[in-house]
């Protein structure tokens, strides 16, 4: 039998499988209606185990593949049942409220809060996100949220992730606690330079100031100094430059950007000291209330799943069942709870796409805690 004949047979089998799949999905819809009338939950773990056990017993050497196929079928069936009959969730109310407003493009102007001082990477992100924005500088990440919450600023811009040094946990904590929404994102290529007052030589340096993220991103270079220089964290890389420029210590240096060296009149002692040339920081723009601007195609979530075998896999299976790509998943220890983790998720999707909102509702139902951070675009 040649290749074309085999493919013809596969096409015939596929046709039968499609008919059976649709029949199975329609039966699932009827089951959902019965469950709704009887006030029974969509989820039935005992029934799932029964189906999968039968599949494993009958599939022979194809058992691993059959198990995966039927696990996906079950997830698709539950997704359809949830879409039709599940009770509205908190995330549905939140998103439908945002979608009720007329769709608009992201503005190019507005008052925006930014942590640090002139020359900070956050300022460069502000300029990229809101080219005609009016920047208000504040002292901390929490102060950015406070400025937006008070109405002083419409937006706030914050770093949320670095390609070399990971997520900015403080910002995630604030997003989760204060229930703000991400409405836009951008990414900057970060270069770090060592700078000091004019006339200072590299061998004269006894102290180096920078933000913790900047220090972490230059750990290899700092390690090469063999502990001869004291490394001191401060609020911001631009703040570090300003402190060195205005300070009286002739032996102090800062790790910051070339723009800060020019802005504060410092001399560059060594350039490109970051661990990797592939050093990018992702910034987010936040607002008090969720707004889903035109073109939004990324969803960010914080999930806390049950601490039991298969819990995370169940979440990933549901996302996969809806055909949504997971572009980021990162675990983070839960403060005060031993060996328990929350997860940061980024999904490539829009809540305007069919099935995405029911998927989010299902994730909310099966998670110990669930925070919808926003649906936005990255520029």
Image: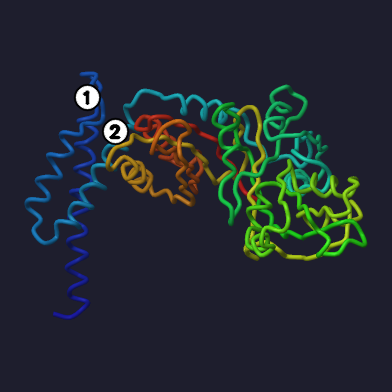
Q: Relative to residue 104, is residue 327 depicted above or below? A: below
Q: Relative to residue 214, is residue 299 depicted above or below? A: above
User: Visible in this render: residue 128?
Assistant: no
Distance of label 2 from label 1 (alpha carbons): 10 Å
Q: Relative to residue 217, is residue 108 depicted above or below? A: above
Q: Nearer the viewer, residue 229 or 277?
A: 229
Mark 1, Cα crowd under 10 Å, few <14 / some 14-19 / many 20+, is some
Q: Please provide percent x and percent y for residue 51.
A: 13, 42
Residue that mark 2 sits on: 81
Residue at 20 percent across and 50 percent down: it is 19
Residue at 79 percent across and 33 percent down: it is 111
Q: Nearer the viewer, residue 95 or 301?
A: 301
Q: Residue furthest top?
A: 38
Colour scheme in use: rainbow
In which quarter of the view is residue 150 placed?
top right
Residue that mark 1 sits on: 35
Q: Please provide percent x and percent y for residue 96.
A: 51, 28
User: Visible in this render: residue 185?
Assistant: yes
Mark 2, Cα crowd under 10 Å, few <14 / some 14-19 / many 20+, is many
In which quarter of the view is residue 181 placed?
top right
Q: Which mark is residue 272?
A: none
Instruction: Classify residue 159 as left or right of residue 1.
Output: right
Q: Earlier in the sequence, mark 2 or mark 1?
A: 1
Q: Please provide percent x and percent y for residue 351.
A: 50, 38
Instruction: Classify residue 1 as left or right of residue 283.
Output: left
Position of the N terminus by quadrant: bottom left
């Amino acid at each position: 039998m040649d290749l074309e004949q085999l493919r013809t047979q596969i096409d015939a089998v596929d046709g039968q499988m499609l008919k059976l799949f649709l029949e199975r999905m329609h039966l699932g819809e009827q089951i959902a209606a019965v469950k709704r009338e009887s006030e029974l939950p969509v989820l039935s773990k005992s029934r799932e185990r029964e189906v999968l056990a039968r599949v494993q017993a009958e599939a022979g050497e194809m058992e691993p593949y059959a198990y995966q196929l039927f696990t996906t079928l079950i997830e698709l069936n539950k997704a359809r049942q949830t879409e039709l009959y599940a009770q509205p969730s908190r995330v549905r109310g939140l998103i439908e409220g945002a979608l009720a407003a007329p769709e608009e493009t992201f503005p190019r102007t507005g008052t925006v809060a930014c942590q640090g001082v002139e020359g900070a990477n956050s300022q460069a992100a502000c300029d990229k996100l809101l080219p005609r924005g009016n920047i208000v500088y504040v002292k901390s990440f929490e102060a950015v949220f406070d400025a937006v919450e008070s109405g002083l600023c419409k937006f706030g811009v914050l770093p949320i992730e670095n390609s070399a040094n990971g997520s900015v946990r403080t910002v995630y904590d604030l997003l989760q606690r204060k229930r703000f929404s991400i409405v836009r994102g951008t990414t900057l290529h970060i270069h770090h330079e060592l700078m000091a007052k004019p006339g200072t030589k590299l061998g004269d340096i006894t102290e180096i100031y920078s933000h913790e993220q900047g220090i972490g991103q230059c750990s290899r270079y700092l390690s090469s100094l063999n502990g001869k220089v004291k490394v001191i964290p401060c609020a911001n890389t631009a703040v570090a430059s300003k402190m060195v420029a205005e300070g009286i210590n002739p032996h102090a240096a800062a790790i910051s950007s070339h723009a800060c060296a020019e802005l504060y009149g410092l001399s560059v002692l060594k350039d490109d000291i970051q661990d990797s040339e592939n050093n990018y920081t992702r910034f987010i723009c936040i607002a008090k209330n969720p707004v889903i601007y035109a073109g939004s195609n990324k969803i960010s979530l914080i999930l806390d799943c049950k601490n039991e075998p298969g819990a995370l896999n169940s979440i990933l299976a549901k996302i996969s069942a809806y055909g949504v790509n997971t572009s980021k998943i990162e675990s983070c220890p839960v403060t005060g709870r031993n060996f328990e983790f929350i997860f940061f998720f980024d999904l490539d999707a829009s809540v305007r796409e069919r099935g995405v909102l029911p998927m989010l509702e299902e994730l909310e139902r099966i998670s110990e805690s669930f925070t919808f951070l926003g649906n936005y675009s990255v520029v």
